[in-house]
Image (cartoon, rainbow, N blue to C red):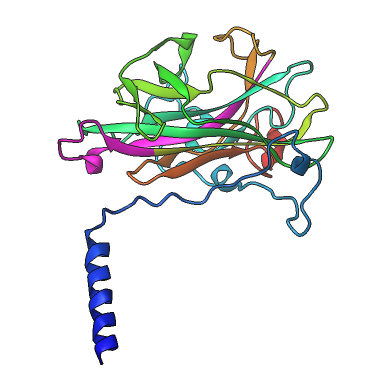
Amino acid sequence: MARIAGFSLLVGFSLVICTMLPAVAKIPQRYNAPVCGSPTAATPVAGKGDNAPPVTDMYGVSEIVPAGAVLSNGQPMTWALHPRMSRGNQPQAGWTAVVPWGQVFISVRGDNSHNTRVEVRNLRLFVRPKSTNVWCQLMWVTTPIGAFFRTDFAGDTHVSGDQRIEPDGGRSFHPVAGSAIHFFPDHRATLPVEGITGLYADFEGRLIKDRTDLEGDFSRSSLVASAGADYWKSDTAPAGQVGVYNEDAGIGKFRRMSPRWRTYSINSTAIGVPSLLHPQAAE
């Protein structure tokens, strides 16, 4: 009885300690693959199949449409409504660089929060080189750089705005009405010379407090995010001339942001996605 009583006391004490511990935000498990050029990226892993990344964000419509992503005639851009493929696995001949990126918009429902920031981190890029046909990690940037752009990205006009580095290494931005938050690496990755048969990019995003000493107002926020990737003519080609020096591979659908980490992605291997380069692909 003494042992049982002691055990009961210990269990009770443990339960008290556990209930006193602060809640830890769950981080969902993410796709991973060996680094490109490493021995493990040269051959498929037995029993693992293709180790293909998820295509979830390449199907269905946007959870909420982003505000301001419209053409000059007032019609919404196709990528605002649903995922859209562009170059896919086919950059222009001779183009040598690629970057993953993300974007955050206030949704058409509007944003009435005052103490909410957007945090993004771990922007990653994976490719499937033709020489190995094995997925591998080409880039991983913990703290991307970024700015506030026009919601139609006209003229590449942008300002730095209110942004800061968070303790966990992520970068956060304070949303501004009429602007889109666009973020990317501080350098470009080099494409495999032989070409690729697949591209996948993703990042983690969530909502955090602007001022930690004040109450959060996430419920008054309506922010959406999506991921994409761009091919570039070279690692030094100037920005601001889409179609001349850079074109996107594709753009994933927009999904809501919340205080919990979510992963947003784009996958060029998805089948049947509306495409600019091959319109018949969606038929």
Residue 101 pos. (x, y %): 53, 27
- Give the answer, above or below, for where 206 lies relative to 211: below
* Above or below, comparing residue 8 to residue 283 in the picture: below
Q: Which region of the structure is painted magenta?
A: 206-232
Position of residue 179 in the picture relative to residue 36 (left or right) = left
- Residue under the point 63% across and 16% down: 246
Q: Position of residue 160 (x, y in %)?
A: 37, 14
Total tally of numbered discs in the picture: 0
Q: Residue furthest left?
A: 214
Residue 165 image-quadrant placement: top left
Picture coordinates of residue 190 (x, y %)? 70, 22
Q: Is residue 231 magenta?
A: yes
Q: Quadrant of the N terminus?
A: bottom left
The percent coordinates of residue 232 (x first, y second) are 66, 17
Residue 111 seen in the current view: no
Is any atom of residue 115 visible in this view? yes
- In the image shown, does 264 or 111 lie closer to the viewer? 264
Where is 6 relative to 63, above or below?
A: below
Between residue 195 and residue 2, name the one nearer to us.
2
Question: Which corner quadrant of the image does residue 195 belong to?
Answer: top right
Q: Is residue 98 left or right of residue 160?
A: right
- Given the current orientation, which residue lies at the most extreme bottom position? 1
Residue at x-position 38% and y-position 24%: 68
Please name whichever residue, 260 or 154, is drawn nearer the observer in this view of the structure.
260
**Residue occupying the point 51% across, 39% down:** 253
Quadrant of the rendered image containing residue 140: top right
Q: Is residue 282 left or right of residue 81?
A: right
Q: Quadrant of the C terminus?
A: top right
